[in-house]
Image: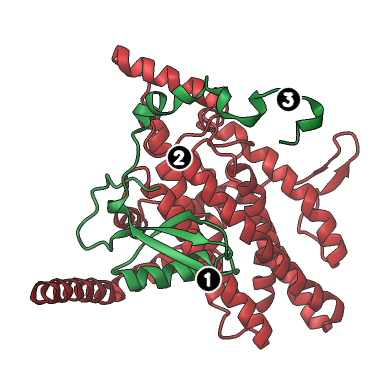
Chain colours: A green, B red
Amino acid sequence: MSDNKTNAPSAEWPLWEVFVRSKAGLDHKHCGSLHAADPKMAIQLARDVYTRRQEGVSVWVVPSSQIVASDPGEKAMLFDPMEDKVYRHPSFYQLPESVNHM
Amino acid sequence: MYTQAMSVGPQDTSAKIKSAEEARAEAAFEARIAAGEFIEAKDWMPDHYRKTLVRQISQHAHSEIVGMLPEGNWITRAPTLKRKAILLAKVQDEGGHGLYLYSAAETLGTSRDQMLDALHTGRAKYSSIFNYPTLSWADIGVIGWLVDGAAIMNQVPLCRCSYAPYARAMIRVCREESFHQRQGYEALLVMMQKGTPEQRAMVQEAVNRWWWPSLMMFGPADKDSPNSEQSMRWGIKRISNDDLRQKFVDATIPQGELLGVTVPDADLRWNEARGHYDFGAIDWPEFWRVVGGDGPCNRERLATRVKAWEEGAWVREAALAHAKKQASKQASQAQTA
């Protein structure tokens, strides 16, 4: 994900984040960013830059300025509480061998 | 292609007095690096770490873009349609590599225009290898084999760089780079095995010209790279210049033997005790001359870049004006609807 805190002059084409679906049935995955004047050009350039070797069957482009991200400073507050909740995982539960495929 | 480890970047100013909070943040950062963690764009990082990365990644990006020029020279003169298609694909890849890298550098808070301005005004460096001319078709094969081979040697360890956006860009680059080296070697193999005596001589002549500049791609000797140690500690650099250079020589000499070419080094010999090839002294004055701007093609390369940038200005402006017009048209249509 790109940081938008640049002091780019206004003549620079806007920044877009590119998401590629590598094959039918899979999620779109973030793969990079690029500059383009408008959505159509962003799709065209994403195709040229990120799928030259059949890496994708579909692309999304999103203006980078539209992405809302969690604050790295709040990482501990947001994600650490899950650390001690092992009972959320199936492996937490010990079952007899005969039903352990459950 | 790749960045040249030149250690001519900003000096570390971390010795200056820090606030207690800064010192704490820096200690936490060092601990993360020591634990092998990756640093992301929005994480706190020391100013010098950021500056070192901006310099290295932008220099690397510039190398990709300028690297398109020596090869582009042969697109219209490739001997067959097959070789032309391959060369076009390779040059397009280099443009793509430049884009991945510029994007990675932009995450550090520098803009694309600022980086290009630094290149165009001569403040930023790019790899010295691209200041040598491509005089024959064999040069295209030799660039793939030696120059891209050296680039791979340098770039594979960068896939584990502590700065994650750079590491991710390098993974993408390395996946594509192998094609570059293999197509070059194969083009040379065809000429050496099925070609005429003139073609074989052309290959040998190209190897003679590119061998030493390729070894120079790994940058100054370790003893002359005072900033390397800091970069190693920060996980920006993983293997020293001299170690990478040795690795490259060891890997390349057997490939040359199979090809049937020699390298222009009378001192080259296998050292059984070391388990490595010994090789002759690099012409460092030449290296610094080329880095300093006085190589065979420095002025021509920069002038070509500046010309392309300036002559493309109206296209960039027109595309933006078109986008604005379309957006306002859509907005007014939405209002009337």
In the picture, measured across the screen, residue B151 lies left or right of residue B262, that is left
Can residue B166 be seen from the camera position used here?
Answer: yes
Q: Position of residue B61 (x, y in %)?
A: 46, 55
* Mark pair 1, 2: CA separation: 30 Å
Q: Which residue is disc 2 drawn over?
A: B8
Q: On the image, numbered disc 3 is attached to which residue?
A: A95
Q: Position of residue B145 (x, y in %)?
A: 71, 63
- Identify the image quadrant of the N terminus of chain B: bottom right
Image vertical order of residue B15 relative to residue B186, above or below: above
Residue closer to the observer: B73 or A32: A32
Lateral position of residue B9 relative to residue B94, left or right: left
Under tag 1, what secondary structure? helix
Q: Which residue is mark 1?
A: B92
Q: Amino acid at mark 1?
A: Gln
Is B271 displayed left or right of B234 in the figure?
right
Q: Secondary structure at mark 3?
A: loop
